[in-house]
Amino acid sequence: MNLAPTPDSLAVTQPQIQTLAVVGVGLIGGSFAAACREAGIVGRVIGAGRRPETLAQAVALGLIDQAVSLEDAAQQADLIFIAAPVGAFESIFTALAPQLNPRALITDGGSTKQNVIQAARIGLKDRIGQFVPAHPMAGSHEKGPEAANAVLYRGRRVILTPVQENRAQAVERIRAIWQACGANVVLLTPAQHDAMVAAVSHLPHWVAALYMQHLLSGEDADIKFQTAGTGFRDFTRVAQGSAEMWSDIFLANRDAMLHELRGLRQVMDRAEQALESRDEKWLMNMLETAAQARAQWPEKQS
Amino acid sequence: MNLAPTPDSLAVTQPQIQTLAVVGVGLIGGSFAAACREAGIVGRVIGAGRRPETLAQAVALGLIDQAVSLEDAAQQADLIFIAAPVGAFESIFTALAPQLNPRALITDGGSTKQNVIQAARIGLKDRIGQFVPAHPMAGSHEKGPEAANAVLYRGRRVILTPVQENRAQAVERIRAIWQACGANVVLLTPAQHDAMVAAVSHLPHWVAALYMQHLLSGEDADIKFQTAGTGFRDFTRVAQGSAEMWSDIFLANRDAMLHELRGLRQVMDRAEQALESRDEKWLMNMLETAAQARAQWPEKQS
């Protein structure tokens, strides 16, 4: 048995990138560029995006070497990382497709995957196999290139949701690159991914925002806000996120969200019944189950 | 105009306590005893409670000088602080009433006020004016006398909800004692208090616990828990609280909770409609309102 890798298998699992193009050089894109540099796996970094001042800032901060057009990015890069609002993906794929280097791979930082893949199919057409969808589970309340840092993905989970057109080599190369950035890579189907983020990320944000709305519309809102303590603080922290980004996410992941909302409502209706009928046994059991599950949660990711 | 206080008004606003009796010497009761000692306003501290080993521990820790029966506490103390599950209040008041020192005042740390006042009316009967209901907005996940500390109430809000039978002097004396412990004292009606805590404290706990229940009963629960990050961590933190205590609180504050749940459901139903119909404008507006309100919240209490 020959354990020495063939030149071909070596090539596919090595994370080296000659020219990385980052589309959207904010927190997510800028941190990816910084992490690749820090890992020593990238030669040149170019950046594209909507706002010239953001690109100039990214150059000044050393995150990218040069600002380019999407067409130039498509031609020059052997890896393209898209970190834009998911609503913009279709037009980005459409702009990249005509000039896309046949050896290039594309990956992304989008928070939803089924609709991003749909956008990629429309934009990339028969080049769809060059796109390996990814979702790094990392973020911050801070925004923009100045918030970017090389360690954002270290120890964080990155979920890859390959499409059937991806060659195994392509998936392995993207995995190796994310691992070089310090991430723990796992593979899920796009549907599994979307259901999962709807449940553990989007639903908490949805409920926290609506809870704020509820408080604001009730009586004595001022007294309530003044008296709120640490429970309120933690429960509502996620509601501070960018309205534009989250509206985008909820609409992008609409079906999974509606499914989650129906499930949560069932549990809440049952609990309200128990409270109405003073069913102490049901309440105790529910609260005990919840408290135990939360106490046992390992908090690895946080 | 004579600004010099009369001996009588001096006596009522001074926080000095000859003998403090604490019923329930855990985190809340033990911290009250420690805070009164630290403030130098108390002579002797006696403690009563269900479990002899807890009382022995409180003596060993120096929180109380002696463990006594409820009857002895009623006879000897000029201030009685009740820090027990709200479900136990009626029997405590009933046990205190027959021997209650006519000069003694009673205050408490119960999380709900209307039902505690009802229990006090049943237990204390015509002595009800000696009870000045209070709710210190402070706590911890830690429990028991070993978690008690003299600074728990420092800078925290304490809500007094006087009953009509309270003399103004009695309310001022209780206010002065809490202030000596470092608390910021505010007065609300019992109904205002219960509505407020239902909204900012009990409802978040309720929703966080049911959200956990929902996750546990869904598909891929393991993947979801493994992938959950900081948003999940903060949103669910309150769900770790003691099931016994919270079941007690929800049932004690049942009417206010049901009112809050109806209000929250209205907002959530409206939002689900907006998501179903892809009403981006409504969603953006809602999310922006929530994010701004949360960002402007001063976080004074936390």
Image (cartoon, coloured by chain):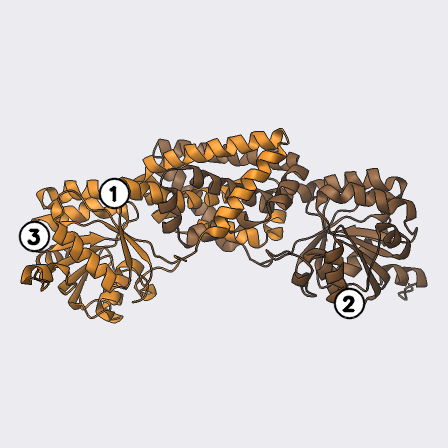
Chain colours: A orange, B brown
Q: Residue furthest front?
A: A1
The N terminus of chain B lies in quadrant = bottom right
Secondary structure under badge 2?
A: helix
Q: Nearer the viewer, mark 3 or mark 1?
A: 1
Distance, label 2 to label 1, CA atoms, is 61 Å
Which of the labelled discs sits on residue B37, or is there none?
2
- Residue B297 visible: yes
Q: Position of residue B85 (x, y in %)?
A: 70, 46
Q: Position of residue A109 (x, y in %)?
A: 26, 53
Distance, label 3 to label 2, CA atoms, is 77 Å
Chain where mark 1 sits: A
Tell which of B90 and A232 is nearer to you.
B90
Q: Are marks 3 and 1 on the same chain?
A: yes
The C terminus of chain B lies in quadrant = bottom right
Q: Indicate whether B192 appears above or below A275.
A: below
Tell which of B282 and A11 is nearer to you.
A11
Q: Nearer the viewer, mark 2 or mark 1?
A: 1
Residue ID for mark 3: A99
What residue is shown at x 76% (from left), y 61% (from top)? B56
Q: Nearer the viewer, mark 3 or mark 2?
A: 2
Residue ID for mark 1: A189
Q: Amino acid at mark 2?
A: Arg
Q: Amino acid at mark 1?
A: Thr
Is residue A204 shown left or right of residue A229?
left
Is residue B171 shown left or right of residue B135?
right
